[in-house]
Each structure stands twice: as structure tokens, then as C-alpha cells.
Image: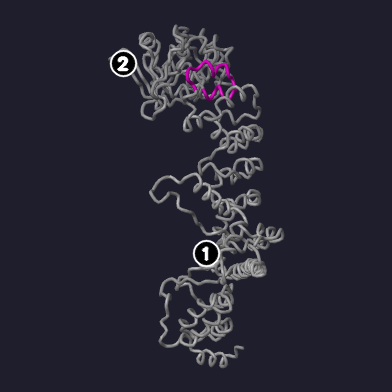
């Protein structure tokens, strides 16, 4: 069997044809095919070129009975093989009688394979040789015109209109245009011109070819090719740019000229997707070049992109992109904690202050044993997740910080009573204030009227008064003013004007109440909450009863209703700071005789051995 016959047999079987079916393609008998395959003869010279074309090979390959390296894959069509063979072999295929402008058995043209293999040499040759005018195609080739725009495409209200003067030549050059789904779009318009949208999603003529040519231009960083495309920047929308920027970020070498002339020029359109794709492709060089560009144009990214950045954990992106206010507001602190401890460690205080409680269910104990981290957890979440050990430390941290604030205010109150003139904080007081204010307590919101009595705008003098008043909320001056305004009940008045930056109350669902939780809460509950729990406790656990009594719980008189206690949710206050004056304490003690049953309380204390 000769090589030619063997090759014909191999190619016939690969196409799933019988000898009779192959013979039918060339109007010959199956016996003739059989003779070729048995090595008893060769095809007639008039059949050499048709057989070679049918199998997608060259005549040399057929006569030699051997496929070259490209043609070895017999599943590839002739046009795919042309592109893979290289530009210098195009003339050879044309001499073989291959119609460069045709389509193969897959209904693909040579242009489709240029796109598939992103071959820039072939693309530039195809443009210069006008292949794109002869193959079914939709590339918006830039053509110089006689108008001052310099080309034939004009932007009007979100649509591009092809000028009527070029309409006939366009129809002749592009009889059928392909849309994004490769469906034909005819250029017929009763008004004598054609319009097509590149900004909307319904009809997208030119989409297929433009996207593919942009892929090649960006992959090879060929700014001259890119600039030859009219209005290419209108394809830089998020959805479309993702399709062609992938080829750019996959390159290890970044051309500075292309980066500066194209990327920087269109940074507002490309930056988001480029940084996202650079992260996905782990292109360190491109990330390093993009970060300074972002620093000059900071803005927020979509939540899904931020999630990708968080999980990538790149030091430059952490510091210069994620750690910006516009992006922090969109990020989930749980995600940061779980996937990016480096970013977690540099988060700004204002963000942690508002978001830190969300970590209560997942944060590990070894990440809490520093600073005030226990302080800002959410006790409700700790109870729901039954993290009682962490809850206990949270309660202790709150009590400590409450005492720090209370001691500071006590010192101010004492100085106020000692001062014969208007009270002013000392430098040491101001330093202490600066350590506590905003992080641990703030002033309660309060404003003056923003309009005068007649509903008009404030006069300049009144406006200045309000502005000066609002400024006092930023420093110690407001606290000085509160203390000076107060009379006998100074500390109580101060506490009426401030609020803590951490939680001092917790809502507990009745279904979650159990003896273990009560034993943890009892040392920290204020007097009202202790009384409420004790008078509604209906079990006989001696440890719980002892704890409630030990820390100040008292029984009500029988005629005292168990107010504020429900079967579903209860609010427990663990802010145990004494703000009453001595006179208030004496007055309250006199009222206790009608409110509490001290005999019952003392009897149970003695029975349980509570001092």
C-alpha cells in the first residue's frame, strides 16, 4: 500500500465515510477508491486538488502521503490550518486553489480562526489585504472622511449613525453583518441610512468582530491597531471589557507605551476590570502598575470584586484599595476576619467601632486577648451562640471601662465643687478626656433650632451661635459646659448627656435563659435587673439564688407587680455605675420599705449562707 492510498484511507475513516460515499463526492466508482487505498493506483491528476481541498490538506501532502505538523490533526479545517501554518505559507495555500474568502464545514471563515488564535500578524495582513471586506464580517474599520470628524461614525444620543453618503458603499462592502450571537443583521433602512446601538443590549452589530479584534490588540499591546478602530472606547463598558482585557492581563510583560497611551487614557473605563482581572490572573507586575493609578482616582468597587480582593490578600491592595472609606463601607468584616488577617490588623478605628460587634459569633479568643476587643462585642450574639466564656470577659471589660469613665467624671465633679469660679479642665483632664472620648463615650445628639420663630433662615448671629455650639461636640468644651450648667446632681446630669460607645444592655430571649447564663450575668447586672430576675426565677437552683442575692437582688412586696418582664424577651442592664447623690440614695432607701420585702430577702440569705 503506497503512502497516498494509506493517507486517503485514514482521512476517509476520520470523516466516517465509506468508500462508496467518498466516491460519490467525486463522481467515481467505489472500486477506484479501493484501488487507491490498496496501493494499486493513484487518483487522476484532475482529482488531486479537489480531494486535497475536501480533506483540508495541501496537494503536496496528498501526493507525498504525509501530513505536515499543522495538518496532523485531521479534525482541523483548511482555514484553521492556514492560520496555524503561519503567514509566510498563505501564498502556498492560494496556489493550491484554496479560496481564502470561503467558509469551511464548520461555517467558519479564516477571520474566525485569526480571532481564535489571536494572531496579530494575520489580522494586520487581513486588514491590509481587504480580507475583511470580502468575508462575512462586522469590524468597524476607520475610514477617513471629508468632514471635520475625520471618520464616518458619529455619536448621537447613545447610538452610532452611519452617514447616508457612505450607506451604499457600506452595504456593498458588508452585505450581511453579524450580531453578538452571529445572527445576520441586514443593512436596510427606508431613511437611506442605518443605525446600530453599541451602548445598549438589544442589537449589537459589529460586536463579534470588534471584541475579537480588541482581544488581539490588547494581547499584543498594539496601540496602532487599536487606534485604527473607530470609537473603540464605546466597547469599554464593564461587560464588554471583561471579554478582551483577559488577553491583556495574561501577559507577563507590560509595555509602558501601551499602558500610558491606552490604559491611563481610559482609566475611568478600564481600571476596575483591569485590577479585578489582574488579581484573578495573579499578575503582580500589572497590579503594581495599577495601584498608583487607583490612588489618584479612588472610588468604590462592587461587593463581588471586593470579596475577590479580600481573599487575594495583596499588601498593596489591602492598604491602598480596600482600606479606603468608600470600599470599607461595602465590605463584610466577617469576610475580612476569615480570609485576610493582614487587612484586619490595619482597619481604621471608626470602621472597627461600628462593625466589630458582628464578629462576636466567630472571633477566636486568642484574637481578643489584647486591648479593648472584648469590650465591643455584641452580648446578644454571644448568648445566641452560647459563647459564655467570651460573654463573661465582655461583661468584665464593660464593668472596668464603666468604672474608668465614672472615676474620670467623679474627679471632674470634685474639681467643680472645689472651684470658686467657672469650672475648666486642666491639661491632665484634657489628656484623659482625649483617651476616652469618641472611643468609649460620646455626647448624645443635640441641636439648636435651625429656623427662627417665623420659619425663616437663622440670622448670621444665631447661625454662628449654632455653629459654635456644634463645634463643642468635637472636644472637651461640651463636657465643661455640661458640668458648669449642672447644679447639685452633677454626675447624674453628665450621664444624661453622654452615651457609651459599647453595649451596656442585652436583650435575652426567654428560650435562651438558663442557669449557666444567669450565673454569668448576676455579678454584672444593675439593681433593677437583679430584682427583676430574682422575683421571676421559678427554679430551685441554690447556686443561682445565692448569686442573685449576693450581688444585691431583693424580693418585692407581694403587691409589687413584676413589671417589664415578659415571656419572650427581656432587657437586662449591666451598667452598674452609681450616679445618685447622697440625698437621692437616702430618699430611695426610705421608699424601699414599701417596695421590697426585706424580711423574706434576709431569711433566704441566711438559709443559703449569703453574707
What residue span does the magenta drawing correspond to? Answer: 214-232
Mark 1–mark 2 Cα distance, whole angstroms, equals 66 Å
Q: Nearer the viewer, residue 95 or 605?
A: 605
In the rendered image, the vertical position of residue 285 relative to residue 87, given as above or below: below
Q: Main secondary structure of the magenta part?
A: helix
Please state, as top left, top right, bottom left or bottom right, where the C terminus lies in the image: bottom right
Question: Residue 260: image x %, image y %?
Answer: 62, 24
Examine the image and state in which quarter residue 312 appears.
top right
Q: Residue at x 56, y 77 (%)?
A: 522
- The residue pinned by badge 1 equals 381
- Closer mark to the observer between disc 1 and disc 2: 1
- List the residue tagged with mark 2: 188
Whether 229 is among the magenta residues is yes
Q: Within 10 angstroms of label 1, few (less than 14), some, or many (20 or more) residues?
A: many
Q: Is residue 504 above or below residue 66?
A: below
The location of residue 537, given as percent across then percent down, is: 47, 82
Tell me if I can see residue 476 in this picture.
Answer: yes
Q: Which colour scheme is used?
A: one colour
- Label 2: element kind: loop
Q: In which quarter of the image is the N terminus?
A: top right
Amino acid at each position: 500500500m503506497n503512502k497516498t492510498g494509506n493517507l486517503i484511507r485514514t482521512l476517509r475513516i476520520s470523516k466516517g465515510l465509506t468508500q462508496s460515499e467518498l466516491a460519490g463526492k467525486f463522481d467515481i466508482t467505489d472500486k477506484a477508491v479501493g484501488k487507491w487505498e490498496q496501493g494499486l493506483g493513484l487518483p487522476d491528476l484532475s482529482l488531486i486538488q479537489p480531494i486535497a481541498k475536501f480533506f483540508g490538506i495541501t496537494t503536496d501532502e496528498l501526493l507525498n502521503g504525509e501530513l505536515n505538523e499543522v495538518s496532523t490533526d485531521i479534525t482541523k479545517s483548511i482555514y484553521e490550518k492556514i492560520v496555524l501554518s503561519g503567514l509566510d505559507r498563505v501564498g502556498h495555500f492560494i496556489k493550491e486553489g484554496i479560496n481564502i474568502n470561503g467558509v469551511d464545514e464548520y461555517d467558519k471563515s479564516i477571520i474566525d480562526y485569526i480571532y481564535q488564535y489571536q494572531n496579530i500578524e494575520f489580522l494586520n495582513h487581513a486588514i491590509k489585504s481587504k480580507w475583511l471586506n470580502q468575508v462575512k464580517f462586522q469590524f468597524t474599520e476607520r475610514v477617513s472622511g471629508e468632514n471635520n470628524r475625520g471618520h464616518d461614525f458619529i455619536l448621537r444620543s447613545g447610538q452610532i449613525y452611519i452617514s447616508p453618503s457612505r450607506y451604499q458603499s457600506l452595504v456593498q462592502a458588508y452585505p450581511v453583518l453579524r450580531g453578538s450571537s452571529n445572527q445576520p443583521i441586514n443593512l436596510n433602512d427606508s431613511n437611506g441610512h442605518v443605525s446600530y446601538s453599541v451602548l445598549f443590549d438589544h442589537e449589537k452589530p459589529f460586536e463579534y468582530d470588534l471584541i475579537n479584534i480588541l482581544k488581539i490588540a490588547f494581547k499584543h499591546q498594539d496601540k496602532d491597531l487599536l487606534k485604527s478602530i473607530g470609537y473603540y472606547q464605546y466597547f469599554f463598558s464593564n461587560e464588554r471589557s471583561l471579554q478582551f482585557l483577559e488577553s491583556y492581563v495574561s501577559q507577563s510583560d507590560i509595555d509602558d507605551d501601551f499602558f500610558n497611551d491606552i490604559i491611563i487614557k481610559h482609566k475611568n473605563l478600564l481600571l476596575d476590570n483591569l485590577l479585578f482581572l489582574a488579581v484573578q490572573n495573579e499578575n503582580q507586575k500589572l497590579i503594581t502598575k495599577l495601584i498608583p493609578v487607583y490612588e489618584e482616582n479612588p472610588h468604590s468597587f462592587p461587593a463581588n470584586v471586593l470579596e475577590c480582593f479580600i481573599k487575594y490578600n495583596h499588601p498593596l491592595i489591602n492598604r491602598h484599595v480596600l482600606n479606603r472609606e468608600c470600599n470599607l463601607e461595602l465590605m463584610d468584616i466577617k469576610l475580612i476576619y476569615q480570609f485576610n488577617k493582614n487587612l484586619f490588623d490595619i482597619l481604621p478605628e471608626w470602621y472597627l467601632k461600628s462593625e466589630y460587634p458582628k464578629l462576636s459569633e466567630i472571633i477566636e479568643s486568642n484574637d481578643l486577648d489584647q486591648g479593648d476587643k472584648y469590650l465591643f462585642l455584641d452580648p446578644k450574639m454571644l448568648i445566641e451562640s452560647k459563647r459564655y466564656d467570651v460573654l463573661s470577659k465582655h461583661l468584665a471589660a464593660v464593668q472596668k471601662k464603666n468604672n474608668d469613665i465614672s472615676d474620670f467624671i467623679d474627679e471632674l465633679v470634685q474639681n467643680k465643687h472645689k472651684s470658686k469660679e467657672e469650672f475648666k479642665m486642666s491639661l491632665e483632664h484634657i489628656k484623659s478626656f482625649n483617651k476616652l472620648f469618641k472611643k468609649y463615650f460620646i455626647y448624645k445628639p443635640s441641636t439648636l433650632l435651625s429656623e427662627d420663630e417665623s420659619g425663616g433662615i437663622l440670622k448670621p448671629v444665631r447661625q454662628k451661635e449654632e455653629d459654635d455650639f456644634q463645634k463643642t461636640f468635637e472636644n472637651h468644651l461640651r463636657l465643661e459646659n455640661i458640668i458648669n450648667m449642672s447644679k447639685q446632681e452633677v454626675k447624674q446630669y453628665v450621664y444624661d448627656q453622654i452615651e457609651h460607645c459599647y453595649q451596656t444592655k442585652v436583650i435575652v430571649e426567654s428560650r435562651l435563659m438558663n442557669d449557666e447564663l444567669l450565673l454569668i450575668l448576676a455579678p454584672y447586672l444593675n439593681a433593677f435587673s437583679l430584682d427583676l430576675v430574682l422575683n421571676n426565677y421559678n427554679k430551685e437552683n441554690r447556686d443561682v439564688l445565692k448569686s442573685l442575692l449576693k450581688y444585691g437582688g431583693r424580693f418585692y412586696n407581694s403587691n409589687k407587680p413584676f413589671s417589664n418582664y415578659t415571656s419572650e424577651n427581656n432587657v437586662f442592664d449591666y451598667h452598674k455605675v452609681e450616679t445618685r447623690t447622697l440625698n437621692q440614695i437616702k430618699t430611695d432607701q426610705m421608699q424601699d420599705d414599701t417596695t421590697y420585702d426585706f424580711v423574706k430577702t434576709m431569711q433566704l440569705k441566711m438559709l443559703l449562707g449569703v453574707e
